[in-house]
Each structure stands twice: as structure tokens, then as C-alpha cells.
């Protein structure tokens, strides 16, 4: 069972090419813990360094899908960082300077605009799936269902976090539950995008719109970093380095990935033939 789950952790494109060989290897070697660990490490490498097919059209399609998925994850990261910065810098007794407030407003508007762009792309993908009637690629979204109640349970757990001797574990559960939900929200739609096979028109729309989302993520990162730098409160300084790391990483990944996806989407010498359904 563990080996089967490890095999399913590989990217769909990798399983299409090497799935049979991996299954045969597991049958020959057995599902030992070391084998499962090797499979999980290999799955991580396959996601970080995807193997592109030799066909140029298929290569561009995979590149655009990876770009859209990465852009979504970076937008989620920026979206999660923004309220943390807003809360820390607005906390009394340190009043938020006017310049800081303006920078945060710019970041907030940028995220709203990027969210609308992503919504349009999701509706386009949803409309095509409704037309074809094949919802197989959307199954990973089912994982979101068990994580949603954590937002209702977390306040109750935090309310009883002062009860000894389990106060530490109760508080940890109250925080980790919503955190797991946020991570799931960031990951599962990206998995759906990589599993879909939309038409060239829809996929090109998603890839090109990802450039605008990447610019919004970068704007948010710059605004958050500038807000932290211009605020001298000790509370802000405590989170400066983590926020800097997240925002710089998200902005860089969004710009690089969206640029590659847009380049693949604009290549029309051999149009991407994706008549296959989602």
C-alpha cells in the first residue's frame, strides 16, 4: 500500500512514461521501507526537475502547465504573507506610518487583481471540463473537504489551550490544522492543473495570464519588504527575515516560471495540439 501511494506521488507525465517500469521494479524488489523512501525521493526529484517528452508540442504543453501551477502556488504564498505583515505592522502601541500603510494598500490591490485573473482562468478551465464531462483530473480537490472543518475546530482548541497538562498539544493542533488547510489549498489546484489536458487555446490563456499574476506577486513582495524596512518596530523586525525569504522566493519563482510559460505559449511554429479532454 505504501509503495503504491509512493508511485502515485510521481508527476502524471513521469508515470505515463515510466510508470510500468517502476511498478515492475517494486514487484521485483518488494515494498520495503527503503524502497518506499527511494520512491518518495525520486518523486520529489521528478517534480523539481520534470522530464519533458521529446515532442516539441508536448514539451511546450508541459511547460505551460508547470508554469501555471507554479504561479498559483506563488500567489498563495504571497496571499498568506500579506495579512501577517499587515497584522504585525498595525499592532499597537506602534502606529503604522502613512508610507507603510500606502505600501500595504498597493500590495492588497495587487493581490485582488491577481485573484480576479486566476478566477477567470479557473472558470475557463471549468467551462471546458463541463463541456467534455470528464472530471477525473479534478479529483485531488476532494482532499480539501476534510481540511475545511479545521477552521471551525481551531478556535475551540485554542480556547482550551491553557488547560494543563495538554495545553501545548492542544495549541499546536489549533494552529497546525488551519496551516495544513492553507497548504492543501495551495497544492491541490496546482496538481489539478498538471493533470488536466485542456485545449491549446485555454492553456495558452492560462500561461499568458500567469505573467500578470507574477507581476502582481512581485509587486506584493516589494511592498511587503519595503513596509518591513521602513517600520522600525521591534515586532516587525522579528519577522523581517522569514517574510523576506518567502516574498523573494515567491516573486522570483513566479517571474521565472511565468516567463517560460509565456514563451511556450507564444511559440506558434508548431501549434500545441491538445484536442484531448481534461
Image (spheres, helix red, strand yellow):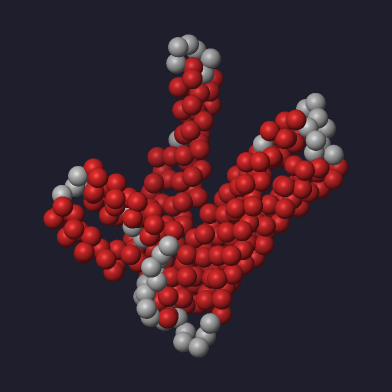
Identify which residue is drawn at 33% across, 64% down: 14
Residue 78: percent from left, percent from top: 62, 50
Q: Quadrant of the C terminus?
A: bottom left
Q: Residue furthest bottom?
A: 269
Identify which residue is drawn at 68% across, 33% down: 238
Q: Residue furthest left?
A: 28
Residue 162, compared with residue 17, is above or below; it is above
Residue 95, compared with residue 20, is above or below; it is above
Q: Which of the 4 image quarters holds residue 166?
A: top left
Residue 124: percent from left, percent from top: 51, 67
Identify which residue is drawn at 67% across, 36% down: 239
Comparing 139 with 257, the one in front is: 257
Comparing 123 with 252, the one in front is: 252
Identify which residue is drawn at 68% across, 52% down: 221
156 with respect to 36 (left or right)? right
Comparing 67 with 112, the one in front is: 67
Amino acid at each position: 500500500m505504501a509503495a503504491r501511494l509512493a508511485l502515485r506521488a510521481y508527476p502524471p507525465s513521469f508515470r505515463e512514461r515510466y510508470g510500468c517500469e517502476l511498478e515492475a521494479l517494486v514487484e521485483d524488489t518488494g515494498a520495503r521501507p527503503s524502497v518506499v523512501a527511494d520512491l518518495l525521493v525520486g518523486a520529489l526529484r521528478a517534480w523539481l526537475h520534470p522530464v519533458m517528452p521529446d515532442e516539441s508540442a508536448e514539451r511546450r504543453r508541459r511547460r505551460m502547465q508547470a508554469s501555471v501551477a507554479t504561479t498559483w502556488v506563488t500567489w498563495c504564498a504571497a496571499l498568506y504573507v500579506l495579512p501577517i505583515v499587515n497584522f504585525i505592522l498595525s499592532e499597537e502601541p506602534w502606529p503604522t506610518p502613512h508610507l507603510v500603510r500606502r505600501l500595504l494598500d498597493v500590495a492588497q490591490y495587487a493581490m485582488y487583481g491577481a485573484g480576479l485573473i486566476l478566477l477567470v482562468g479557473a472558470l475557463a478551465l471549468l467551462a471546458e471540463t463541463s463541456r467534455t464531462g470528464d472530471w477525473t483530473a479534478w479529483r485531488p480537490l476532494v482532499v480539501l473537504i476534510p481540511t475545511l472543518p479545521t477552521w471551525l475546530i481551531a478556535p475551540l482548541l485554542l480556547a482550551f489551550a491553557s488547560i494543563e497538562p495538554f495545553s501545548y498539544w492542544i495549541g499546536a493542533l489549533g494552529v497546525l490544522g488551519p496551516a495544513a488547510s492553507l497548504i492543501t489549498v495551495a497544492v491541490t489546484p496546482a496538481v489539478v492543473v498538471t493533470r488536466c489536458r485542456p485545449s491549446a487555446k485555454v492553456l495558452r490563456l492560462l500561461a499568458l495570464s500567469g505573467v500578470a499574476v507574477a507581476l502582481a506577486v512581485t509587486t506584493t513582495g516589494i511592498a511587503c519588504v519595503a513596509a518591513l524596512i521602513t517600520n522600525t518596530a521591534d515586532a516587525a523586525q522579528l519577522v523581517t527575515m522569514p517574510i523576506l525569504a518567502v516574498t523573494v522566493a515567491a516573486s522570483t519563482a513566479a517571474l521565472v516560471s511565468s516567463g517560460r510559460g509565456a514563451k511556450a505559449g507564444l511559440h506558434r511554429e508548431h501549434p500545441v495540439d491538445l484536442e484531448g479532454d481534461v
